Amino acid sequence: MLFRKKSDNHVQIHQGIAENKRLVQEVIWGQKFYFAIQDSQWLHRTNFNASGWALGFPALYLLYRVLNVVKPKSIIEFGLGESTKMTFQYIGSFPDARLQVIEQSQEWLDFIDNEIPDIAMHVKILPIETRIIEGYETIIYSNLLENISGRKYDLVLIDGPVGSPNFSRSQLIDIIENDLLEKDFVILLDDCNRIGERQTASRCLDLLKRKGIANSIGFYRGMKTMLIICSDKYKYLQNF
């Protein structure tokens, strides 16, 4: 019993060290983010809440740099929230850019509409349902492809729907499978510290390889982990 308690204490110590390291990384990314957006020509409202289910500072930093440098023309965003505060300001300053947000909750849209007036015209409310992948149940948006087909996207931002234990947010696979990516693209998949998102990412990378689409990946880590998958044109984004 004595040795078991010592082992348990060892685990707790290592877990505490790992959590403190993530917290320090988060703080550093927060500083980098606010330095990056100083004197921004288009990002003027900076009241971001990088906590809880929302994007963390690594993700906010990366999203800002992608928008500011890549200047995507066709953006699709899964999950309405902190990232939308940024993408909405971006399209307001770049009229040739288009934004499509997919969200599951009308109540959440009504709430966010108070913070981001006129965002509703860019949002499609799609209820959620379940899909079975390799014997596992995962949550998806209903009738997604019917609502997003007809154009291709050069920025895909995935932070919804709510996560699943396995093959979480698997409709990123559908986007790749149905050739909805532009030749040059950026994919941002949040919460890749979790197994479900990593399973989806692995399936996506295998699919890109089978399609012969050269790509590069990178991880931005804080309290959560953002994965970037991009065409080789943007491989510098791995360490930005």
Image (cartoon, grey):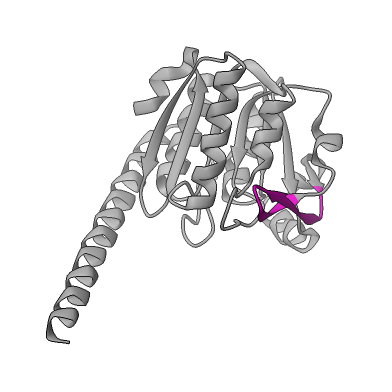
Vertical comparison of 59 with 5: above or below: above
Residue 55 percent coordinates (x, y): 50, 50
Residue furthest to the bottom in view is 1
Q: Position of residue 184 (x, y in %)?
A: 58, 15
Residue 42 visible, this orientation: no
Q: Is residue 192 left or right of residue 106?
A: left
Task: Report the number of discs.
Answer: 0
Magenta residues span 125-140
Relative to 24, residue 208 above or below: above
**Residue 90 place in picture, x, y as percent:** 61, 32
**Would you say residue 181 sits in the magenta stretch?**
no
Residue drawn 58% across and 22% down?
Answer: 208
**On the rendered structure, is 26 left or right of 93?**
left
Residue toward you, 187 or 108: 187
Q: Residue 180, position in %: x, y? A: 72, 24
Q: Nearer the viewer, residue 143 or 105?
A: 143
User: Is-magenta flag for residue 129?
Assistant: yes
Task: Name the residue rendered at 79%, 22% in the picture.
Answer: 151
Residue in view at x 57 percent, y 44 percent: 83
SS assignment for the magenta stretch, majority: strand
The image quarter in which residue 121 lies: top right
| Quarter occupied by residue 87 | top right
Kindly tell me whether residue 222 is visible in this rendering.
yes
Residue at x 66%, y 17% (from the top left corner): 182
